[in-house]
Amino acid sequence: MTFVFDATPLIYLGKADRLDVLENLRRETLVPNPVYEEVVHRGLRKGYVDAKRVNQFVRDGALQQRSVEKPTRFERLTKETKLSAADTAVLSLADEVDGTAIMDESYGREIADTEGVKTRGTAYFLLLLAKRGDIDAGEARGIIDVMVDSGWHCSTDLYADILRKLEEIAPE
């Protein structure tokens, strides 16, 4: 299974200086070119540290930059939805590689559901890593907390659900 990353997860993992957790996924991790442009090129022009971190991660090969090879869905979604070019590329590439789009925005996830593209959010793969023992529950919570402190949007209900799941994972 391949994970195709949208901007938000990369930005906030970069802000938390925890892009390294992507290496524990044991799956191919891709970033579509429009997302790379949004996160790295625009971010570097604005002097964002997270953009430098994401760029280094791509340069190191832990996250692979990729273009959408079959533009039919991309073109249709661009015309028929209010998705950004980056979000459209994430869904199109995830469909192409039979992967999972990692995105947190509800509108994009709703469109993905309609299109039959599997999605998960940032919290999902942090919980996955904690459940597998690649990171401990406390570390996962710390990452989530730093992301929230950095501006990552998470409803109080979702945050409480994440904490409950982390408590279930944590050894007694």
Image: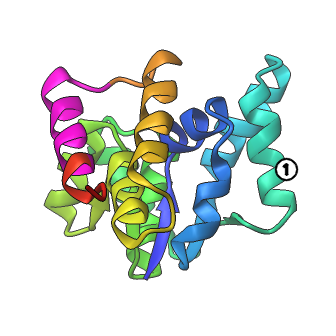
Q: Percent x, y for residue 53? A: 78, 41
Q: Percent x, y for residue 101? A: 39, 61
Q: Which residues are magenta?
A: 154-166
At horizontal 78% and vertical 55% (from top left) the residue drawn is 57
Quarter of the view holding residue 20: bottom right
| Amino acid type, label 1 | Gln
Q: Main secondary structure of the magenta part?
A: helix
**Split into 4 quadrants, where in the image is the N terminus?**
bottom left
For label 1, the residue is: 56
Quarter of the view holding residue 84: top left
At horizontal 21% and vertical 64% (from top left) the residue drawn is 115
Q: Is residue 9 visible?
A: yes
Examine the structure image and report whether residue 39 is included in the region drawn in magenta.
no
Q: Is residue 73 visible?
A: no
**Split into 4 quadrants, where in the image is the C terminus?**
bottom left
Q: Nearer the viewer, residue 117 or 138?
A: 138
Residue 20 left/right relative to 74: right
Q: Nearer the viewer, residue 30 or 148?
A: 148
Q: Percent x, y for residue 104? A: 34, 41
Q: Is residue 126 above or below residue 18?
A: below
